[in-house]
Image (cartoon, rainbow, N blue to C red):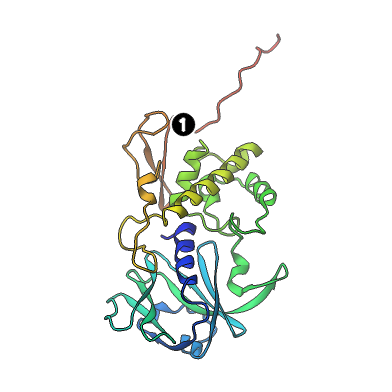
Amino acid sequence: MPELPEVETVRRGLAQWLPGKKITDVEVLHPRATNPRSIAPLIELRGARIENINRRGKFLWFTLNRPYVVLAHLGMSGQFLIEPRSTQPSSHARVRFTVNDRRRELRFIDQRTFGWVAIDQLVMEGGEEIPNSFQRIARDIFDEKFDREEVISRIMKKKRAIKPVLLDQSLMSGVGNIYADEALWLASLHPERSANSLKREEVDRLLTSVSRVMSAALKQGGTSFDDLYINVNGESGYFDVELEAYGQDGEPCSRCGTEIRRIAFGNRSSHFCPRCQPRRPAKKVGTKRGK
């Protein structure tokens, strides 16, 4: 599933072309392309002018010259592609957005049909307008209003394993399976460590690792294992060649040489180094009792 670096890469690509464009027509090619919670059918976007392309976590939203927005989630395999009007749409095309551009149009492609597009109303949060659906989605680590101290405090109160805590989009959005494994490896923390057993400096180190890993992925255009994630121009991301833990089971850890392991984690998998990321924190060496 595309995570923050992939979605931000798509946002940047769209932001270079879409703002200022007027939507002249919308064609829905698959019923599952529209989120059932959409406050109106997508055809209502006719005549709207796109003002900006925004993102929170894994969600994209287009601000319009109207009191509502276009909200989108890429799901497992969703793609926004800017393609020539003259070309035949992919068999997996779900929505076509015609704009006042004689040569190109915007197409939402989704092979597995878990992604969606919707119209959402705006609400006020913290002095700014956001899509109503975002009230359940926390700010991501790159958001200028991200409250690091509050997030650290909330993480340290969780009684669950740290891996699913990282995936909790109501706590901190944008992190998925790939970058959770990578950040935990970089921070030398076992995915099954209980969040409330972590010290403040460990959680702080983990958040720094999240930021570092996703910043590095952004520079590579995200992570692509196949053509299910590509940028708006059809290019793949190349961060997969730099992955240290995710999908590397059986390979030697680049820090210590120990074989990377994969364990089942609910309906997910986690990849980690059993030596660099011990299940239990190392005990401090102290004086013997009574001395």
Q: Nearer the viewer, residue 85 or 259?
A: 85
Is residue 290 positioned above or below 205 on the image? above
Residue at the top extreme of this rendering:
291
Is residue 47 positioned above or below 74 on the image? below
Is residue 62 positioned above or below 3 on the image? below
Percent position of residue 18, x then y: 48, 77
Q: Nearer the viewer, residue 176 or 156?
A: 176
Q: Answer with left or right where residue 149 lies relative to residue 211.
A: right
Q: Secondary structure at mark 1?
A: loop
Residue at 37% x, 81% y is 104
Residue type at mark 1 is: Cys
Residue at 36% x, 53% y is 238
Q: Answer with left or right where residue 52 lies relative to residue 128.
A: left
Percent position of residue 290, x then y: 71, 10
Is residue 191 visible from the viewing direction of this image?
no
Q: Nearer the viewer, residue 85 or 178?
A: 85
For mark 1, does the 10 Å Cα neighbourhood hold few (<14), some (14 to 19), or many (20 or more) residues?
Answer: some
Task: Tally the marks.
Answer: 1
Q: Which residue is mark 1?
A: 276
Q: Quadrant of the N terminus?
A: bottom left
Is residue 169 positioned above or below 15 on the image? above
Percent position of residue 20, x then y: 52, 81
Residue at the right extreme of this rendering:
127
Is residue 9 visible from the viewing direction of this image?
yes
Q: Quadrant of the C terminus?
A: top right
Percent position of residue 75, x then y: 42, 66
